[in-house]
Image (tube, grey):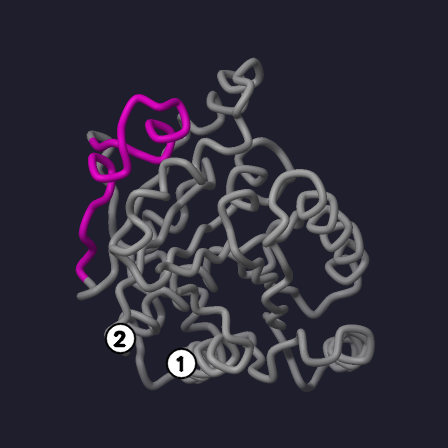
Amino acid sequence: MAIVISISNQKGGVGKTTTAVNLSTALAAVRKRVLLIDLDPQGNATTGLGIYSKRMNTSYDILTQRKTLSEVIINTSIPGLSLVPASIDLVGAEIELVQNANRAGILKNALAPYAKAFDYIIIDSPPSMGILTLNALVAADGVLVPLQCEYYALEGLSYLLSSIKKINANYNESLSLFGIVLTMHDKRNGLSVSVENDVRKHLGDKVFKTIIPRNIKISEAPSYGRPVLIYDVRCVGSYAYMELAKEFLEKEKREQWKKN
């Protein structure tokens, strides 16, 4: 059964999409069957994998129940990695779903028939707590939070964790925090080190040991429509995401996340 992970943070610019794309790529590289769902109207995970066509079904069609998952999934250039693309139409989904009584559970229901087709389903959520993110969290088994090593990112973390608890209590009792990954870390910057120490002090082993550094190759890769692991496999950013995938798999096995 697929493990569904929502990559979420209510603050933008924290490396959320970059983490979704590169973690998915790294898992596919070790022969896992991975589905990446782009649920962000900006569609950055879609273009980050080199998909630019405007004539395709998207996650909007799933949420508005116009299409099934099988009609929306496309193959990527990366073996083992499939994609549900996104488009700006998702902005309209927020409005269209307001009066749908089951609006929070649409994605979960759409994924259910395909649970055995993948090992991992990774959802790239938008940087807000609206209907789109709610669908991602209701469908997910766990939440992976990319946290930029800056003060404002840390300030919003408690709000996100509170939101996860509320969704756990009201919509999805199996939802829990899978982990926090520190991003855009600069070891020369005292603030980065301070934020890291604070997060590790308060959240302990929920924080991944792997840290994603600031790296120009990570920033450049999306403009070429490639994950950094494909763009420059030897850069420090690629090594970091490969280590993150390794730790991700070890954590899953250690905590027995795999469903029967």
- Which part of the image, by quadrant, shows the N terminus? bottom left
Residue 61 in the magenta stretch? The answer is: yes
- Quickly name the residue at label 1: 242
Q: As drawn, which residue projects farthest toward the top? A: 99
Residue density around tag 1, few if under 14, some if 14–19, many if 20 or more, within 10 Å = many
Quarter-of-image position of residue 49 = bottom left
Quarter-of-image position of residue 149 = bottom right
Residue 59 percent across, percent down from the top left: 36, 35
C-alpha separation, residue under disc 2 versus residue under disc 1: 9 Å
- Quickly name the residue at label 2: 29
- Which part of the image, by quadrant, shows the C terminus? bottom left
Q: Residue at x 67, y 43 (%)?
A: 167
Residue 88 percent across, percent down from the top left: 41, 30
Circle 2/circle 1 CB separation < 8 Å = yes
- In this rendering, the answer to whether 99 lies above or below 10 is above
**Count of numbered circles on the image:** 2
- 4 on left or right of 29: right
Q: Residue at x 21, y 64 (%)?
A: 80
Residue 208 percent across, percent down from the top left: 60, 78
Residue 70 in the magenta stretch? The answer is: yes
Residue 3 percent across, percent down from the top left: 42, 60
Say what amino acid the circle numbered 1 marks.
Met
- 209 on left or right of 156: left
Boundaries of the magenta span: 56-77
- 67 on left or right of 127: left
Q: Residue at x 45, y 51 (%)?
A: 123
SS state under label 1: helix
- In this rendering, the answer to whether 59 lies above or below 120 is above
Say what amino acid the circle numbered 2 marks.
Ala
